[in-house]
Image (spheres, rainbow, N blue to C red):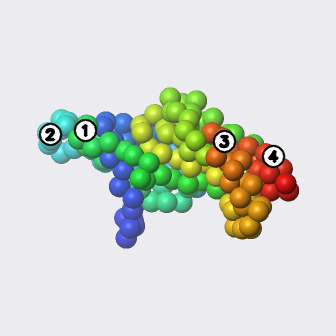
Amino acid sequence: MTIPKTTICLWYDKDAEAAARFYAATFPDSSVHAVHHAPADYPSGKAGDVLTVWFTVAGIPCVGINGGTAFKHSEAFSFQIATDDQEETDRYWNAIVGNGGQESVCGWCKDKWGISWQITPRALTEAMAAGGDEARRAFTAMMKMSKIDVAAIAAARRG
């Protein structure tokens, strides 16, 4: 395995491998590259426990570390996944929320490990980029949603 120059490091209590395998099974261009075990005991684990997992999520290189409960995730970090249609939006949203995650608002949800995800249809991004009244109407519609409804965004954009 070639270690990339830049990676995102995600802190997990103890489930980095399970999270990485879930991401690899859920998102295209995702895979688990390596699982490394602790060579000795450490503050939140024992020798032989999974310590780090090298993986890719939607083309983004990541390393997960099983560091214990010292740090928690927040919405200050999230993966944003651009989707092409409602079917793809539903598939990712349902995979995350249906696997022990939780819904939030405006296309945001959290997986069961506390990582935040923005499942963002391109239709919403395009509506916001249009500016003016189209963007305002799409934004107002989005603010009432949990999972983004592509048809509702298109209707709001048209007025």
* Circle 4 residue: 151
Q: Is residue 36 left or right of residue 30?
A: left
> What label does residue 144 carry, if any?
3
Tell me, yes or no, if residue 33 can be seen here: no
| Callout 2: SS | loop
Q: Is residue 65 left or right of residue 116?
A: left
- Decide which of tag 3 and tag 4 comes sooner along the chain: 3
> What label does residue 29 carry, if any?
none
Residue occupying image coordinates x 47% and y 52% = 78
Task: Identify the amino acid type marked 3.
Answer: Lys
Residue occupying image coordinates x 30% and y 37% = 13
| Callout 4: SS | helix
* Circle 2 residue: 43
Instruction: Determine the CA span between mark 1 and mark 4.
Output: 42 Å
Tell me, yes or no, if residue 10 can be seen here: yes
Instruction: Determine the CA span between mark 1 and mark 2.
Output: 8 Å
